[in-house]
Amino acid sequence: MSRSSRRGSRRLAAAALAITASMFLASCADNGSSNGGGESADSGSSLKIGMVNEQADPGTPTKGGTLTFSGYSAVTTLDPAKAQVAGATGGSELSAIYDVLMRYDPIGQKFEPKLAQSLEASSDSKTWTLKLRDGVKFSDGTAFDSKAVADSINRYVTNKGPQSSLWASKVASIDTPDATTVVFNLVDPWTGIQSMLATGPGMIVAPSAQQGDQFTPIGAGAFTREKFAPNEELLLAARPDYYDGAPNIDKLKLISIVGAQPTAEALKTGGIDAAYMRTLTPILDLIESGYPGFVDIPSLGYIANVNMAPGRPGSDVRVRQAMALAVDPETLNTRVNNGKGLPGQEIFQDTSRWHNDVAPIGVDPAKAKELLDQAKADGYDGKITFLSIQEPSAQATALAIQAMLNAVGFGAQIEYVTGAGDLVKRMYADHDYDMSTAALSLAEADPYERLYTGIKSGGRNNATGYSDAEMDALLDKLGVATTDDDKKAVLAQIQERANETVPWQVWGNVAALDVWNQNVHGLEQSLDGIVLFDGAWKS
């Protein structure tokens, strides 16, 4: 291999690790806090997906002003091909610049066209025809046409964007029969193309955006870049020529305040106008205090990965089963979240549209001890190390897990690393760990993509080494299911197989909240916590 090829390979590996880290950090938010026990808010178990504290009709929108939004994590790139596009990782910020071809309506549980005029499937769901709106232009004045759409998506795949491997495996070719029509020819039936076009691949960059190694954020969204200081601030200016009319607000200021409690305080004092939050205690407090917002509850938000590589304790399915049977999510919720979390072992809790009646593996310390004794009889010494960051709720989780595992005969130890970056590298890059907190955060719109990349044999984000031919077949079956009923039937089978093979240790979910002040109106929700700002205004 040449020196330049080696450099290119290292760059790709580093980019992949950065993307994985952003996914992990977004998913593994603080699940609560043991220092907030005095609240009068309802139990976290009462949280449901949907609007809270809905506002009355505010009347005619007013023009002008700056809206300040605090995202969960700071924006580090304005290139959709280099970002894990989700509400917690720059999805809202990037959508302001690029908009999206499709939008997911989380209330109606359906996809709607945004920059697209329509998206229609053939009877067999193997051909999808996208029609573009008239009058849409990129912010540099060039045409937003079918060739630009196809070229942008091909660029996304070539640059190995986070969703590119699944896209490449599903989309055989793209045709552009005329300037307003894009035809996607699929390998097999697939409805997940809708969610793809609502996230990274559906954020279309202008042909002029990439000039050699230089990238300029030029999109068809409602705002353009005015100032960008990575990890600090993104300031956007409204586009008077946006296809749907000039935005009501003049400026959009996008920041990320470190810490959920300081974020909530900034909202209360008017330092910010809106925020995306994933920490239970301030979420419950803001809801109790009457702040309007939208609650999202992605599935598999609070889990543990167990390394299944040869020689690791998790390579023995009996050990994984024993761990699952030993850990009581309700006890964990009490110790970590003051009983206010969303505990459970199901892949899809009853808050999810994908919930099924298949019981999870259950909690049974006696059976856990029996399985562990069997593994010990075959040479396992019972030792396992839990990798954790040095942060209060993470430490509380680690100590609770250690106690419950040791109670059935494990010799569990805790190893602390300084920060999440170290943990991510150990788990996802080096695969040097036994067990650690993680998450998949399956989107309600379509859980297939993250299930596929998370537990498919050789999947992009398969950090555990889990490999099961029967599960692979079920994932393939889920990928070609085209109705919700068919998908739910396969997901029930996936729950049954997960009970037997234990791809993760499932402890519950983590709620997320898009929240804003009473004088803010017109924010629109989309897929995976993404907020759209083109209709926003302040009274």
Image (spheres, grey):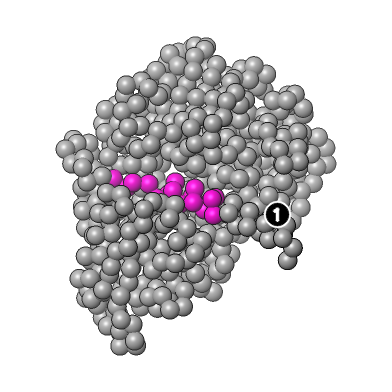
Q: Where's residue 349, x and y in %?
A: 36, 53
Q: Is residue 180 above or below residue 350?
A: above
Q: Is residue 187 above or below residue 516?
A: below
Q: Residue at x 22, y 73 (%)?
A: 408
- Residue 41 in the figure: left or right of residue 312: left
Q: Residue at x 61, y 30 (%)?
A: 97
User: What main secondary structure does the magenta stretch of the protein show?
Assistant: helix
Which residue position is annotated with label 1? 171
Q: Is residue 54 visible?
A: no
- Residue 74 in the figure: left or right of residue 505: right
Q: Where's residue 345, x and y in %?
A: 33, 60
Outermost residue on the front side: it is 3
Q: Where's residue 441, x and y in %?
A: 44, 51
Q: Nearer the viewer, residue 120 or 94?
A: 94
- Residue 513 in the figure: left or right of residue 383: right
The number of numbered badges drawn on the structure is 1
- Image quarter hosting the C terminus: top left
Q: Residue at x 36, y 72 (%)?
A: 320
Q: Residue at x 23, y 60 (%)?
A: 400
Q: Which residues, given as a range, are shown in magenta?
A: 16-32
Q: Quadrant of residue 119?
A: top right
